[in-house]
Amino acid sequence: MILRRRTVLAGGALAALGARVVSAAPPPEAVTPALVEAAKKEGKVSYYTAMDLSVAEPMARAFEAKYPGIKVAVERTGAERLFNRLAQETASKIHRCDVANSSDAAHFIVWKREGWLQPYVTVDIAENVPAELRDADGAFVNQRTHLSAMAYNTSLVKPEDAPKGFNDLLAPKYAGKLVKGHPGYSGTIMTATHQIARELGWGYFEKLAKQKVLQVQSATEPPKRVEAGERAIAVDGSDYLFWMAKERGAPVEVVHPVEGTPQISNPMAVFKAAPNPNAARLLFAWIMSGEGQSFIVNLSGQYPANRQVSAKAGRPPLASIKTFREDPSDVEKTADEIKAKYARIFKV
């Protein structure tokens, strides 16, 4: 069952839940012994995420080590699938999600409007996360930022022959050598497709489709296909996986396109119907703390939201990279159109 975004807003079963407008963020809360004890009594928490399991699972284990007795169930899937799953569960009055993290920031616009999110602000977030990285009403906060970069396998492509930007990928010599993710599955690719189409036009994708591109689903797949040598060049993909592969010694080189690199925010929120509300708050608070943010940065090199934490050494500072502008509000309005155009062009 695939739900269109506008259907989510208009569907009777979902609308009946009642959207309400949050007028202001709640007062910041500290992580107290009482919260920890209440979370331990619940003993579990579910974390729905689009982040690759190579990062999400170790992060969950780190939280469990910090708070023994609380088990984290990681539910990982592509962000667009995650969006549909939560709509289906909510419509069926199945409440399993405690904390959700998506690579499509537009999802949180919908979820907030539908009244599904529980505003929650920690003292750490209030003091250390810039206002532009969190919802003014406290409904969600940017957990991490990554890029949708290009990359190539250095065993298959010489540096002097490597593409430097999106338009270079249209050269005949790259036909049959490319792999890319799908915006119907991946929030990263949805966001990136929106930005590329705005900057380069849909005509660019029409030309790219003639290059015999290997189409995969998740933004986590192109890095793996390039590392394995199944394709020489990735048109897109989660940059942190390219970097992690390179650090393992894989023949992978990251490319920030000369035209600009799509930037991907990854918000996170506590769900109002969370079956484990105290454990949900505790997990949310820990991920956004200096300790949690440092864990994500040290493991994957994604860019932190908490300003107490520095970017990983060896990664280019985010400010040094030419990036495209994000516009979650426009993505929310045009997502179904983007999916339809993309499917028509690539015939997938």
Image (spheres, rainbow, N blue to C red):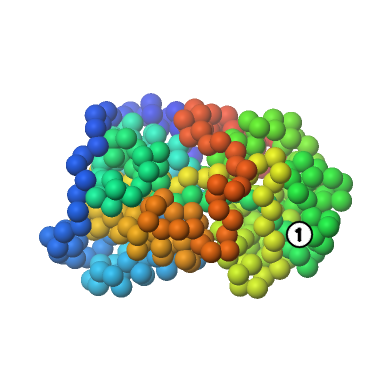
Categorize mark 1 by other alpha carbons within 10 Å: few (<14), some (14-19), many (20+).
many
Quadrant of the image occupied by residue 221: bottom right
Say left or right for 154 vs 268.
right
Quadrant of the image occupied by residue 287: bottom left
The front one of 65 and 121 is: 121
On the image, the x and y values in percent for residue 284 come to 30, 54
Which residue is depicted at the point 41% across and 63% down?
A: 294
Can you say whether 21 is above or below 97 in the image? above
Say left or right for 89 vs 53.
left
What residue is disc 1 on? 232
Can you say whether 327 is above or below 250 in the image? above
Say left or right for 309 vs 14.
right
**Residue extending farthest right:** 172
The front one of 289 and 178 is: 289
Which residue is depicted at the point 38% across and 52% down?
A: 306
The front one of 183 and 326 is: 326
On the image, the x and y values in percent for residue 147 come to 57, 49
**Residue extending farthest left:** 34
Circle count = 1
Any part of residue 190 in sight: no
On the image, the x and y values in percent for residue 1 come to 47, 41
Element on which disc 1 rests: loop
On the image, the x and y values in percent for residue 15 come to 31, 29
Kind of residue indicated by mark 1:
Ala
Say left or right for 86 vs 70.
right
Any part of residue 147 in sight: yes
Which residue is depicted at the point 49% across and 54% down?
A: 303
